Amino acid sequence: MSATRSSEPPEGPEAGKGKSQYRNYREGAGRVFHTYLEMHTRQSLAFVQSKLAQYGSCSQRTMSIMEALELLDQLVDESDPDVDFPNSYHAYQTAEGIRRAHPDKDWFHLVGLLHDLGKVLVLFGEPQWAVVGDTFPVGCKVQKSVVFADSTFQDNPDTKDPRYSTDLGIYQPHCGLENVLMSWGHDEYMYRVMTTNNLALPKEAFYMVRFHSFYPWHTHGDYRHLCSKHDLEMLPWVQELNKFDLYTKQEEMPDVEGLRGYYQGLIDKYCPGRLRW
């Protein structure tokens, strides 16, 4: 069964905020703009390669999914203009939105809980600009749909290298996003955690986690020249996750204590025990 292509806010208890009120980068741009400025200045091809070497083997520590989720009690995402509460609550909000819309796909409920767990990198000591926010390909020209594209890349060393100044840059046409180096952050890191630990989830789950922050692609339609047929087949799934990732961000907090038992059951089913991070 395929996912729905709709990008509209889901119906139900979380539908109290209008679509145009989300991802407003004109208001409250102080901390948000500063985070993106740091990110777009420092996230070069060389930086991404260094972080893949540092974290790609998931050898930092071992902990369970619930232990990682509890760490996010300490994290408020500085790149997000829509929330000012700990990321752990957002995980449950996303998961519960998916659960209401897709009651027969328990693995998808778990994806909602897992999708931002890579942000534990902040608790490992990484700055937020190297963990949170929208992602974009490095090694090629930055497209205009990237947040603050016109005002934050001027000091990025890659913008001065002609090899990276074209739409394709170092890549081949339709090479597939799995062969593209994305700006380093929680998406790629959590994908590496999932693959390293061989989580018993379908391929759609891995793909959604890996590319859910790639807004220039899944929302604005840019970078299609890098996409393979597989990417286009997976796109509706990323868009479906995005509905709940974005539109469930409400001030009403979920009953974490009441929900923990259900999600612990899913963890025990699909990714039990202590994982490598």
Image (spheres, rainbow, N blue to C red):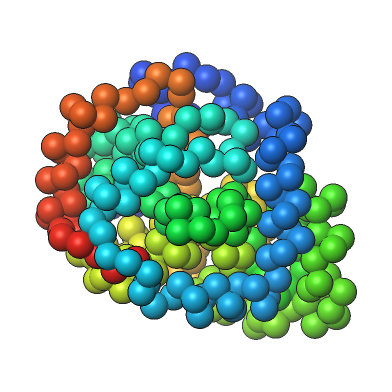
Say which of 95 and 118 sits in front. Answer: 118
The one of 147 and 225 positioned closer to us in this rendering: 147
Q: Foreground residue, 138 or 227?
A: 138
Residue 220, relative to residue 204: is it above or below? above
Tell me if I can see residue 146 in this picture. Answer: yes
**Image coords of residue 238 (percent x, y):** 45, 52
Give the x, y percent position of residue 133: 59, 49
Q: Is residue 224 visible?
A: no
Residue 184, picture quadrant:
bottom right
Q: Residue furthest front?
A: 125
Q: As displayed, is residue 190 above or below residue 215? A: below
What residue is rendered at 65% in x and 83% in y?
Answer: 172
Residue 55 drawn at (x, y percent)? 45, 72
Q: Is residue 228 above or below residue 263?
A: below
Which quadrant: the C terminus?
Answer: bottom left
| Residue in the image at 38% along x and 69% along y | 60
Left or right of 120 on screen, residue 53? right
> Residue at left 47%, top 41%?
75
Residue 153 vertical position relative to residue 251 in the rendered view, above or below: below
Residue 95, by quadrant, is top left
Residue 154 location, x and y as percent? 86, 60
The reply, left or right, for residue 29 in relation to residue 194 is: right
Would residue 178 appear left or right of 50 to someone viewing this image? left
Residue occupying the point 36% across, 19% down: 13
In the image: residue 264, left or right of residue 72? left
What count of labels does the image hold?
Answer: 0
